[in-house]
Image: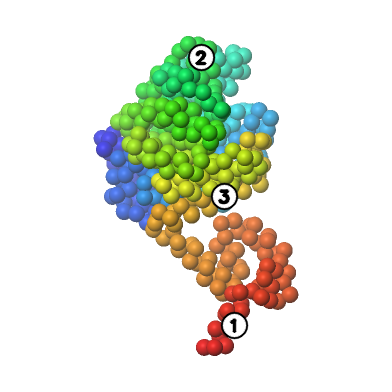
Amino acid sequence: MSQALKNLVKNRDFSDVIKKLAKKENVNFKELTQSITKGTCVIPLNNTKKISNPCAIGKNLCTKVNVNLGTSTDKTNVKTEIKKLKCAIALGTDTVMDLSIGGDLKAIRCSIIEHSSVPVGTVPIYEAAMNVQKKRKTFLKLEKDDILDTLESQARDGVDFFTLHCGINRTSLNVFLKNKRILDVVSRGGALLINWMQKNKKENPLYEYFDDCLKIAKKYNVTLSLGDGMRPGSILDATDKTQISELEELGKLTQRAQAAGVQVIIEGPGHVPLNQIQKNIELQKLICHGAPFYVLGPLVTDIGVGYDHITGAIGGALAATYGADFLCFLTPAEHIRHPSLEDTREGLVASKIAAHAADIAKGIKNATLWDKQMSEARKKRDWPKQIQLAIDPWKAERYKASSHPKVKNVCTMCGEFCSIKLIDECLTKHQ
């Protein structure tokens, strides 16, 4: 256990949040507190603010889901991103991340934080690189203070967790350069840093000045999500030497962060075939000392273009069943365009279904209660209740409104031959 993390949980305000979340998760307060001090659970919560829906992520807790928001260089409509945020919160996302790279990045971030009732994460290297690109014509002129100033500014604004690609260092980069991949690097942050390192012939500043990053994170109680800048972007690159090399570096950094009193989660792949998912989870838990695992999907095939919310949900359900703690959603737009509001809705629902299915499989307390209530409503053909219990009530209500059966209290799938209706009538007659 980290003494510094023990000191963190003694903070009265933070302890009150632990109590609230222990009750919500139906777990023991003392056990959740110990899990945080051991580093197997985290509560991303910047100490400069309070939010109405904080969450705990980690061992023996229900699987959490994150939604990515933010502008691109082609799409910079902030109002659209806020609509996505409100939709995601209404559908029950646990966290959101602002991945903006276009427009006024600080203003966009502050607007998302202002409107969010859930924890907000960012990837600070994006803003640092974009700002340098504007000021010095190229992000390759990025300097140490550009990064640290960005971290401080974002933490001060109220960001709850940072993705930092610290595992890319000279050691892991050399492994990458010596081992051929089909898709070299698909992480935007990873690509930015590798380009910078190769051009400047220097160590990754996020790695070299990791202690400075920790000081800022500790000051504001920002949780670090140690990013997988070398995650596989093809199932044929999964679990290769490059991926594992970076993971080993993240394992070392995990212990340094926890010793400094900073909460840590680990980001994971990426594109992984079904038969390698269990191995990936087990490796992460072993190498990173049981830290919560945040998986980006994983996508179980590379051919699902237009349907990658499905390929990601399949992988996410299996990953969470084997012990992943946190799923990053994918939308139908993954790999091909900036996601729309409807893409965001579809992606979140798919990930929430995956998370809930995994919670049932791993025996999370009361996970099946929701399903029991739905089954009882179906037996009664209680359509309003079924719509209320649906993971996406809006879509369920829209579909039911379009169903006009000739017989009352059934749907147009079976009509008068509704199996539930037939058996209900049969049993009633023969009682």
Q: Is residue 305 above or below residue 259?
A: below
- Colour mapping used in the image: rainbow
* Amino acid at dot 2: Gln
Instruction: Give the residue displayed 68% in from the left and 33% down from the top.
Output: 75
Query: Which residue carries the number 2 mark?
Result: 198
Q: Are marks 1 and 3 in contact (CB under 8 Å)?
A: no
The amino acid type of the residue labelled 1 equals Glu
Give the position of the N terminus as an image quadrant. Answer: top left
* Residue 118 x/y as whole percent: 49, 44
Give me the residue at 55% from left, 62% from top.
389
Q: Choose the circle earlier in sequence order: 1 or 3.
A: 3
Q: Which label was assigned to residue 350? A: 3
Judge from the rendering whether residue 80 lies leftward or rightward of residue 54; answer left or right. right
Q: CA distance from mark 1 to mark 3?
A: 35 Å
Q: At 38% across and 26% down in the image, what residue appears? A: 249
For the residue labelled by badge 3, is the local secondary structure a helix, a strand or a loop? helix
Secondary structure under the numbered disc 2 in the rendered image: helix
Query: Of marks 2 and 3, which one's residue comes earlier in the chain?
Result: 2
Rendered view: 222 above or below 192: below
Expressed as whole percent of the image width and height from the top left, the position of residue 307 reads 63, 45
Q: Residue 422 lies in what quarter of the image?
A: bottom right
Q: Tell me which label, 2 or 1, sits earlier in the chain.
A: 2
Mark 1 is surrounded, within 10 Å at the Cα level, by few (under 14), some (14 to 19) or many (20 or more) other residues, namely: few
Which residue was labeled with disc 1? 425
Provide the secondary structure element on which disc 1 rests. Answer: helix
Residue at the outermost bottom position: 430
Above or below: residue 149 compared with residue 391: above
